[in-house]
Image (cartoon, coloured by chain):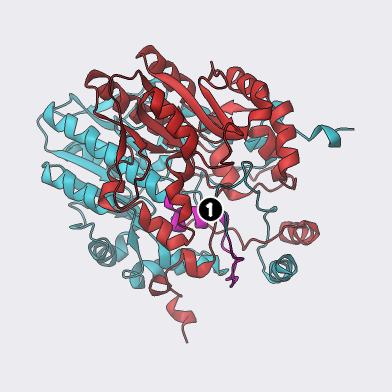
Chain colours: A red, B cyan
Amino acid sequence: MRRTALLGACALLAGCATTPAPQAPPPPPMQHSNPPQFVSPPVPAGMQYLYGSAEASALTRGVWHDLVTYVAAKVKHRPADSVVLAQGATLSDPRYVSCGDKPFAAVFDADETVLLNYGFESWQAKGGKFSPEIWSQWERTGMADVEPTPGAVAALNQLRAMGVTVVFNTNRSAANAAYTEQALDHAGLGPAKHGDTLFLQGDDATGGHKDGRRATIAARYCVLAMGGDQLGDISDLFNAVSNVAQRRAAVATPAIDANWGAGWFLFPNPVYGPQIKGGMDDVFPRDKRWNPPAEEK
Amino acid sequence: MRRTALLGACALLAGCATTPAPQAPPPPPMQHSNPPQFVSPPVPAGMQYLYGSAEASALTRGVWHDLVTYVAAKVKHRPADSVVLAQGATLSDPRYVSCGDKPFAAVFDADETVLLNYGFESWQAKGGKFSPEIWSQWERTGMADVEPTPGAVAALNQLRAMGVTVVFNTNRSAANAAYTEQALDHAGLGPAKHGDTLFLQGDDATGGHKDGRRATIAARYCVLAMGGDQLGDISDLFNAVSNVAQRRAAVATPAIDANWGAGWFLFPNPVYGPQIKGGMDDVFPRDKRWNPPAEEK
């Protein structure tokens, strides 16, 4: 019954392009004594995880806690270098902007890093199709329909209490700066002031690239930590690697690996972005494929 | 063209039940000069993220690094308590098993915590339907088709080098113990010895519940850290909360929140498990819904 109804909805929707949702390998430990009474519209697994689950909340809280612990140690012993890569650095030869005696800062992306876009994603869950125009409308009208990521408000407050300036570097539009300041304030994450503690797409001529804005920030501050949901929040160099397997390998080299959880912090986002990419051959190496023995004839 | 082909595949597949994959809010910073030349079968977004993305790898590496840093500090200053909840503890009154002078341990789930099940999930990505029987076949024949989670091998080696025993507590079956020991060894995560450093479903009469096994482990060891992809890897108490919003709230109370990233460590899994649950009303609070103003008439 349910399957048929969903197939119908699926066939009607324009972008329907996913395979069946996988089921849990280990038997779930929960015991439901009653069957669910109401079946609301299906929500993609990645959204269930990110916007609804206790697990994503616990994970995110842990990242914020460890980020604060990491920064606190650096505030006590000023490092020689920012965690921002210097101009001319490469992933195989990472070098960093020096700190000098610049004031401390931590730099964060906005969307799905400090903010969860409940309003916009609820509309996408119901079949809304992303376009730059609709997203711009969201920036200008959705300021009350966001939530902070779990643990973000406490973490940013703790950073500021240590004397660390919180700077946002996001690809939201400079034209909508006042609205984004408002959204961050509404979520309890502010203050954010455009050109001071808020850097936006359109601030320079490099579009969605963030390295230019990061260089501006690192010229003013000793950046102790960066956080984001995408590698472009750390360095544009990662996004120059378009092959899925090569991109995954690029974060694993010793000099890069050492930064994860130690200056560079990633937050979960299985919903959108360059991390949601790849067909079977990209995601599942051929030498790790498996079929049940009974099906292998 | 591509959309039509995928719609066809979608209509043919039995469990097709998802809404359209959402697209990225911020314009992707990557610039592709060439269109993709080959379209391989679609992979669910959560699998693209977990098994393929650099972002999930970087996040996972960060969690492992911070776990090792946390444990190293505790090894230097022995804590009074394990991070395992004591019998009779509740989420509003969490109390912990005491450490005494027991040897140190860290306790981890196996699947999607230290192991990534590439073989099994590749089969699910192609439409394979989970059943306990097929999963048992996977335990017995898939030992070479797993990979360690990014950063796990180095982290477990560092823990052992500090004198911390690595213990696995998983819902794989006790009947397949020898195969799971082999899978962990093959991934470079061993040694794992059933009854000693490997605890399995069937070791006691409580099925998929892990608290009994945790009590056994905490009776022998001072447990400095626990890690898993599901809250059941931390305490069965969380899984007694079945309402999605209440479960998410349960990890946020001050006494519980303080443990995330500090004794209790979550790894990302947007693919399966009790975290993949909830319809629109569960995942997206009604007061955070949004529609583009143009559509609001």
Q: Is residue A189 visible?
A: yes
Closer-to-camera residue (B103/A33): B103
Q: Is residue A27 visible?
A: no
> Is residue B289 a member of the stretch shown in magenta?
no
Relative to residue B10, is residue B196 drawn left or right? left
Q: Which quadrant is the C terminus of chain B positioned in?
A: top right
Residue at (54, 36) in percent of width and height:
A112
Looking at the rendering, which quadrant does residue B88 occupy?
top left
Relative to residue B173, is residue A238 drawn left or right? right
Q: Chain of mark 1?
A: B
Looking at the rendering, which quadrant does residue A176 occupy?
top right
Q: Position of residue A10 (x, y in %)?
A: 75, 59
Q: Which residue is mark 1?
A: B46
Relative to residue B148, is residue A184 drawn left or right? right
Residue at (64, 29) in percent of width and height:
A174
Q: Determine the residue located farthest toward the right in the rendered image.
A: B297
> Is residue B48 a member of the stretch shown in magenta?
yes
Residue stretch in magenta? B33-55
